[in-house]
Image: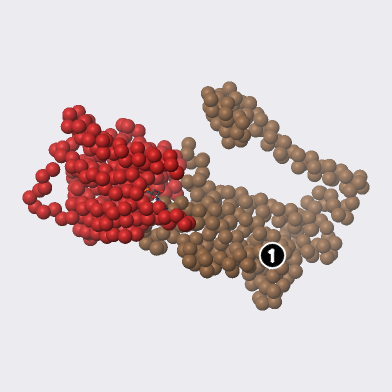
Chain colours: A brown, B red
Amino acid sequence: MSTPLTGKADGMESQLEIAVTAPGAKGFHIRGDVAERLLSVFSPLLLLLLWEFLVRTGLLDARFFPAPTGIVSTFWALVSSGELFNHLSASIVRLAVGFVMGATPGLMLGLIMGLSPMIRAAISPMIAATYPIPKIAILPLIMLIFGLGEMSKYVVIAIGVFFLVLINTIAGVVNIEKIYLDVGKNFGASRKNMYFTIAFPGALPLIFAGVRLAWGVALLLIVAAEFVGAKTGIGYLIWQSWQTFSVEAMYVGLVIISILGYVSSLILDELERILIPWKSLHLSA
Amino acid sequence: MQMPAAPTETKVSIEGLQKFFRTGHTKVIALDNVNLAIPDGQFVCIVGPSGCGKTTLLRILAGLETPSDGRITVVQGDKNKPVNSMIFQEQSVFPWMTVKDNIAYGLSMRGLDSKGKDEKVDYYVKKVGLSKFAKAYPHQLSGGMKQRVSVARAFANDPEILLMDEPFAALDEQNKILLQEELLRIWEETRKTVIFITHSIDEAIVLGDRVIVMTAHPGTIKADVKVEFARPRGVYELRAQPEFGKLAYEIWGLLRDEVLKAKREEGAE
Ligand SMILES: Nc1ncnc2c1ncn2[C@@H]1O[C@H](COP(=O)(O)OP(=O)(O)OP(=O)(O)O)[C@@H](O)[C@H]1O
Ligand SMILES: [Mg+2]
């Protein structure tokens, strides 16, 4: 039993191994697991209780930090009026459309630039020059060009997503071991098949990392875009709450955004497991 | 070996081949004035010290490198078959494809329909002993198993010329013998032209019609030794013959100086 001994120092993944290889240790680890899970559920609840208590006793300023119960009741009011659903769906549609508009060309150009050193050399300087511009800084310009309608939101998200997907796709293709391209050539892969059977799947792990980053940036950009030029959306809800000083609704908006971020990261995890089975260790059992 | 009465067509001819690599300001000559004519259907083994340019030679024949000087002619016979398939020295199995898809790769690239493809692929999956792992991904296989996938991928592609770069070096002894016998059997059946690189003199004699001994870096051809054992051959039966030992000793004598020279050069660098 040398694996458990070396495994202990290695942390999480190896501990799972211990649970499998050493039956004696199994019970201990499951109990440890449950305790950890209970702790991670109860500690936020405790914090909320403390928050509520501090507001009610006047120790915390309710104008800035309204009581959790107040936020919950505002939340229900917004849900039952259908208002929250309208804001949420408006934001999600903008995110989805903008994401696809940016990720598709980012992916395609990235694959082409990744496989062709010439095209990479020609286009890279322009990417390097434009990438560092904060996307929020060009929001006014985008609104000037595309107006206050939906298109300006799509475009600002698309630009942010485009760069991250592009850069990660290029890196993904460039980092593919040369031997795989040799195999493709030797076994008669056409240009198209070089993309579909080697460049794309070979780069997929890094492309996916890019998609994750891009989604985070998209969430940031949609809120910013909805602050200034929208009449719907979660960003609008937060901004309007500030203007009308309805702090509870503002908190509802914040909670919704964080839930949106959390749920989408779960979906991305699942998607990664399905799309990149060769990286997943779960199938090997 | 006596030449057959009918004149055998030359499949591969290499004339005055030179290859150098430029890295920065230094020029490395990998191959220098290599001349070789390989008749159609011959099994040629190449031995030579490490770094003498064996892989480079095979990669040039595979069309993955261009010669710096000299001429290479490969005659294509059957228009429906790929001219060559290479089994690479290093790990070259696609991590993102299952064992089966990897083995089917050449056939898929040629656009074979799935019926004819499945039959061929299943046959070779079984031949290399990976039936249980047909749907597995390479990260679930051992190093030797991956190498067997790469062997099956080239065989299934059914090329006119098999280019094999130390294909069995990473295998355990038992699987090595099984695959050597399988290779001999396939060769008896199909009489493909095979160019087979190995560091094992035994392996070269067991498999080849001819063993080419290369000099230390820069690689040229030092000797061309005929192997005249009758076919079909059995791996162990052949080793039991006294002529086998004599031939192995002769080839070792040729190779020994080159290996020592290569070692000295490495030390000097
Ligand atoms: N792409 C390259 N760039 C620069 N030098 C190279 C390149 N490929 C090979 N070489 C050099 O050419 C020489 C021959 O290399 P090669 O890989 O053909 O040797 P080899 O005979 O296959 O050796 P081994 O038996 O160790 O596999 C070596 O000196 C190597 O350093
Ligand atoms: Mg080599």
Which of the image's four quarters has the C terminus of chain B?
A: top left
Q: Could you say where residue A266 lies in the image, as x and y percent from the top left?
A: 61, 49
Name the subunit of mark 1: A
**Residue at 48% of width from left, 56% of height from top?**
B24
**Residue at 30% of width from left, 36% of height from top?**
B256
Q: Could you say where residue A3 lies in the image, as x and y percent from the top left?
A: 54, 28
Report the side of A211 relative to B88 (left or right): right
Image vertical order of residue A89 relative to residue B214, above or below? below
* Pointer 1 residue: A134
Which residue occupies the foreground of this view, A162 or B143?
B143
Residue A36 seen by the camera: yes
**Residue at 33% of width from left, 52% of height from top?**
B31
Quadrant in the picture for residue A239:
bottom right
Q: Could you say where residue A92 lies in the image, as x and y percent from the top left?
A: 64, 61
Q: Secondary structure at mark 1?
A: loop
| Amino acid residing under circle 1 | Pro
